[in-house]
Amino acid sequence: MKKNPENILVLNLGGLGDLLLCTPALRALRNHFPQSRIFLLAFSGSAGVVGFAGKKGEQLVHEIICADGIGGIRPVSGSSGGSCAGMLRLIRYLRSKKPDVLINMRSIGSWSGSWKMACLCFAIGAGCRAGRNTAGRGWFFNVKLPETHFGDMHEVDYNIELVKMLGVAKADRTVFLQVDEEDRKHAEEFLSENGISGKDDIIGINPGGPPAKRWSLENFRAVAAHLHMKRKSRFIVTGAREEAELGNAFCNSGFPVVNAAGRTDIGTLIALIERCRLYITNDTGSMHLAAALGIPLVALFGPGHINKFRPFCLETSCAVVYNKADCAPCERRICDMRKCMESITPDDVIGAAEKLLE
């Protein structure tokens, strides 16, 4: 690897949480190689969070390139994640950046994923290829960070240890998240239009996520009913566009609820979460947003890799509710049994919420 690489390409083809948790490592790269140009390849649905994840005025990367090429930041013209022609255009665009170093900041979860990532890395043509050697599946990297399949460290630490192998000496492990004043204004307008004033105590509810990671809507309702009866709290439901109906179903609960699922951009979502007195959520990207903002947080874990993806924040501001099942962790998106999530009771969550609210 060059002592002072001219161009660095970072790959993170994950979700919102994956992108947010790699930002401390991106910041460390930026500080250690101030003369280098850093490019990030990500999916458009999650890439935007990087623009909010530095200190005020801090630019973590020079360009974000959207792998799917739709509706994101600086997409490759005409590219499409679903077509061979689109993939070839994307590879040509990445090669045009002439990266000296390529860094993949994600685990490699399967051998099929290993071969796909190897083909992408070799096609891009960077001389130095760095990444996780997840259970031996990172064989094609020049710089390999050992990792078990389910991981023994937090995702933040894996990414930091990886860039340290490239010579980065110091790294701030803090996940920063900026809130734009214009987004705060949009959030307050959204709340006002839905009958919530600046004096109201708001509790955020995030009932979505992959089906295997969802706590039942009835349980969320039971918790919210208790908190409303005791504290007269107002509630706001967050989630992705495809979870809007889930939010609508929660709204029919007999207490004040506003459904924001699918109705905001990433900046306004961050501002809405910042406005919450408490945030109760499944294991989702929004969980990591709340943790980075320091909002009191109750996180419900089931099949997820808790060592790697638990909220990265002070324990005093966060309660992780987790009853390990004999089959956890796993990587199922759909599960008929869901023993891990069904073992969590409303009383478990109410107790954790009350402690944080006090």
Image (cartoon, rainbow, N blue to C red):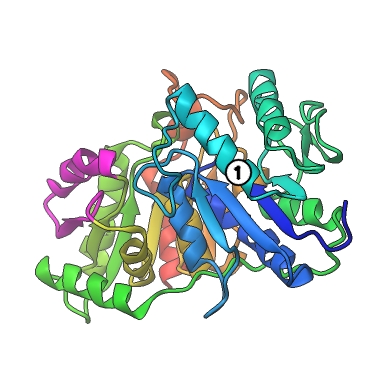
Q: Is residue 320 visible?
A: no
Residue drawn where x is 60% and y is 47% of the image? 309
* Rendered image quadrant of residue 268: bottom left
146 horizontally vs 334: left or right: right
Q: What x and y, as percent, mark residue 298?
A: 46, 56
Question: Which type of secondary structure does the marked residue at label 1 adopt?
Answer: helix
Q: Nearer the viewer, residue 181 or 296?
A: 181
Q: Nearer the viewer, residue 190 or 167?
A: 167
256 is within the stretch colored magenta: yes
Residue drawn where x is 60% and y is 34% of the image? 324
Q: What x and y, as percent, mark residue 247?
A: 22, 45
* Rendered image quadrant of residue 77: top left
Residue interval drawn in magenta: 241-263
Q: Quadrant of the C terminus?
A: bottom left
User: The disc labelled 1 sits on which kind of residue?
Assistant: Leu
Q: Nearer the viewer, residue 131 or 352?
A: 131
Q: Is residue 215 visible?
A: yes
| Residue receiving disc 1 | 94
Label 1 neighbour load within 10 Å: few <14, some 14-19, many 20+: many
Compared with 84, 238 (above or below) is: below
54 horizontally vs 227: left or right: right
Q: Nearer the viewer, residue 46 or 232?
A: 46
113 is within the stretch colored magenta: no
